[in-house]
Image (cartoon, rainbow, N blue to C red):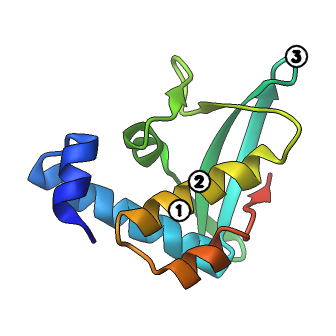
Amino acid sequence: MKTNLIKKEYKLSDKELIHFASNAKRYIKAIRDGRMCCVIDSVSSSGMSRTLKFIECNGKAGNYNYYNFYWLFDQLGYAKVKNSDLFRVYGCGMDMVFATNYDIIHKFKNLGFITKNTADNLSQKTPNRV
């Protein structure tokens, strides 16, 4: 993990850096384990943007827990949707859930959380849609 780069780029305190690293590792593990889900709340009438959230599913049948990555997405610079736990992503003509995960995984590679080979693998694992 490139601590100084993360602190500088995302303007994080030491405490926030620990939280960022924890969330990044949790995100990576959820993608690796196939436990990441994406909720697509809405698509704009033009089709140029979507509001969505990525959530991690933990637990056993009948007793699932869901954890949102709102804080992490905020730190990574995604556009927040006012008065909600959603983010807006822009683009059309491609799978935006795939593209969002691809971008995040490669950011984590550049920040030293994972290797290039791991990033190449995990960036292809599109989260399930719910």
- Let me know if residue 59 appears in the view: no
C-alpha separation, residue under disc 2 versus residue under disc 3: 23 Å
Whether pointer 2 and pointer 1 mark residues with C-beta atoms closer than 8 Å, the reply is yes
Q: Which residue is mark 1?
A: 106
Task: Describe residue 75's horizontal placement relative to residue 12 as left or right.
Answer: right
Q: Amino acid at mark 1?
A: His
Image coordinates for residue 119, horizontal then vertical, percent: 56, 74
Q: Which residue is mark 3?
A: 46
Q: Nearer the viewer, residue 117 or 87?
A: 117
Image coordinates for residue 84, horizontal then vertical, percent: 55, 25
Image coordinates for residue 127, horizontal then vertical, percent: 72, 62
Q: Nearer the viewer, residue 127 or 1?
A: 1
Q: Which residue is mark 2?
A: 103
**Is 95 above or below relative to 60?**
above
C-alpha separation, residue under disc 1 versus residue under disc 3: 28 Å
For the point 63% across and 76% down, the residue is 120
